[in-house]
Amino acid sequence: MAVLDVRGSGEFGMGHLPGARWLARGKLEFGIAALVPDRATSVVTVCDTGLRAALAAATLRGLGYGDARYLAGGVPAWRAAGLPVVEGLDGADVSVAEAQGDFGHTLWSGPLQRTRTDMENYLTWEENLVKEQP
């Protein structure tokens, strides 16, 4: 069985089901064959509410993955059942910087936390923007 997290990579990095692989819903049709080459494999899709996961499971069935299902209630339902989640990007083929950008804010904790050097580099970049103005 394959567990496929179809949220954004930043969401995946902040907490996903153990053993899950990441593939954004928008990239599903292009990337599924590389992650799950055997269409007879059972696939469970996961997101935060179940909506994207339900759409992803339907898409997978349309692509010939006959045993594609989704986790109703998503990651919050998993956590509510007292089951563990894993932080980090293991299972996602993206860098920390890409996941941070995908998540959409600059306050980080856990596996996506920015370092002091990251913030100093950003401030230097901003200061150089002012210098570039005519």
Image (cartoon, helix red, strand yellow):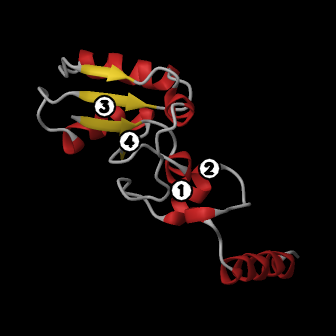
> Which amino acid type is marked by label 1?
Ala
Q: Secondary structure at mark 2?
A: helix
Q: Nearer the viewer, residue 46 or 34?
A: 46
Work out whether 11 lies above or below 30. below
Who comes first in sequence, dot 1 or dot 4? 4
The residue where tag 4 is placed is 23
Query: What element does badge 1 sit on?
Result: helix
Residue holding disc 3: 29
Q: CA distance from mark 4 to mark 2?
A: 15 Å
Residue at point 81%, 78% (across, down): 132
**Amino acid residing under circle 3:** Glu
Task: Please state, as top left, top right, bottom left or bottom right, where the C terminus lies in the image.
Answer: bottom right
User: Which circle's residue, 4 or 3, is located before the other in the chain?
Assistant: 4
Counting residues from the N terminus, which is met first, the one under dot 4 or under dot 2?
4
User: Circle 4 — which element?
Assistant: loop
Marks 3 & 1, CB-CB < 8 Å contact:
no
- Mark 3 to mark 1: distance in Å? 21 Å
Q: Quadrant of the N terminus?
A: top left
Residue 108 point in image, percent of width and height: 68, 62
